[in-house]
Image (tube, rainbow, N blue to C red):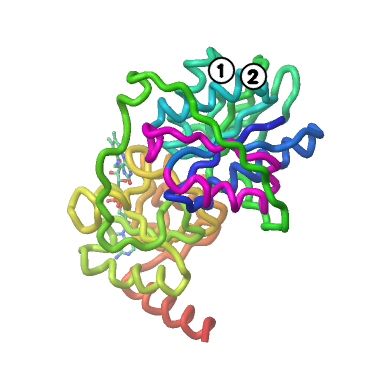
Amino acid sequence: MILVLADHDRGELSELSLQAVEQGRQLAQTSGVPLHALVVGTGGSAAAASLGAYGVATVHLAVHDGLTDYAPAASARAAAELVARLAPLAVVGVGDQRGNEVLAHLGAITELPVAADCTSVVLGDPTAVVRARWGGNLAEHALLHAPVALVSVVPHAVRAGVPGNGVAAVEEFTPELADADLLVHVVDRTAEVGGGISLTEAKVIVSGGRGVGSAEGFGMLEELAGLLGGAIGASRVVTSAGWRPQAEQVGQTGTKVSPDLYIACGISGASQHLAGMASSKTIIVINNDADAPIMSHADYAVIGDLHKILPAVIEATRAALA
Ligand SMILES: Cc1cc2nc3c(=O)[nH]c(=O)nc-3n(C[C@H](O)[C@H](O)[C@H](O)COP(=O)(O)OP(=O)(O)OC[C@H]3O[C@@H](n4cnc5c(N)ncnc54)[C@H](O)[C@@H]3O)c2cc1C
């Protein structure tokens, strides 16, 4: 069987989690084995109930006082228990920070190698993976010599499956956890001001750099993002200047994104920025410098002053949506 680590937030499975489930489902189908999922934490029953629709045959629901919220080492300990008991062909995790952290702990506990951020996985002996490295600038082909392949799926490499009528069997278990497994756990939550669509999950990102000129300048980007159902991104210059919150920074020291559409406004395309967005499916650049480095990554480019171009784009978008 294939085991997917189905991350969720108080019962709600994220888009990225459903992508990992879909990768697991495809591997299970190719290998002719069932798909199982591990779910931990508060709201786990709700998450477990929805997983059947995405092809999961059995959900293992870990129930433990130490597993009410995100606790990476403890989650990995629960996963390791299942790996020992059920001997899956592969364990598939979500390729975000949480998923990769749990997988790293699982690799350490089980002494199995981990291939993080995969764009392709072909199970076998050895398992062949392609991994997105350097923010998607490099596709690394690697072979995984291991009895159980521990892999995570880079965001948006796989599309989430379409829910069907399946119903998963749910089996509760209580993992054996030591105090050392619970050293890292969530103690408090603070709601993000503004909320909105998360950067990692957004299919469209309207991103701004120094060329936007001011915090107020982002009003245009917000308007366009609103029309397109997208999120706002920013370069480090912008977050360092305090024009936008750090959470919106895209790049090597920010968030790595791979949306369907990335609109880069007034961003030069420094390597540290490219490391976070170069794997976006379509990149539109608005920049007044035809020689800016980001141009070599652009699918479409508009050369000119973004303060004149963006209002026209907003107007045309509004007209197209009317
Ligand atoms: C260790 C390290 C980590 C880093 N991590 C990150 C990171 O995670 N993310 C990140 O973004 N950066 C990161 N940086 C910073 C990075 O090197 C660049 O300094 C930064 O990305 C540049 O931001 P920018 O493109 O907004 O600004 P600039 O490089 O100044 O580019 C501004 C662009 O806007 C254009 N422009 C100006 N006015 C207009 C206008 N009116 N209309 C249209 N275009 C206009 C200009 O032609 C130019 O191309 C990091 C740097 C270091 C050293």
Q: Is residue 152 visible?
A: yes
Q: Is 59 rendered above or below residue 11?
A: above
Residue 317 position in % (x across, y down): 48, 78
Q: Nearer the viewer, residue 273 or 146?
A: 146
Q: CA distance from mark 2 to mark 1?
A: 7 Å
At x 43% / y 30%, what residue is drawn? 101
What mark, if any, has residue 144 been given in the picture?
A: 2
In the rendered view, does 169 fall on the left or right side of 140? right
Kind of residue at disc 2? Leu
Residue 67 position in % (x across, y down): 40, 35
Which segment is the magenta one?
A: 42-70
Badges 2 and 1: C-beta atoms under 8 Å apart?
yes
In the rendered view, does 26 fall on the left or right side of 224? right
Kind of residue at disc 1? Pro
> Who comes first in sequence, dot 2 or dot 1?
1
Q: Residues within 10 Å of mark 2 (few under 14, many from 20)?
A: many
- Corner quadrant of residue 260: bottom right
At x 63% / y 46%, what residue is drawn? 158
What mark, if any, has residue 145 been given in the picture?
A: none
Secondary structure type for disc 1: loop
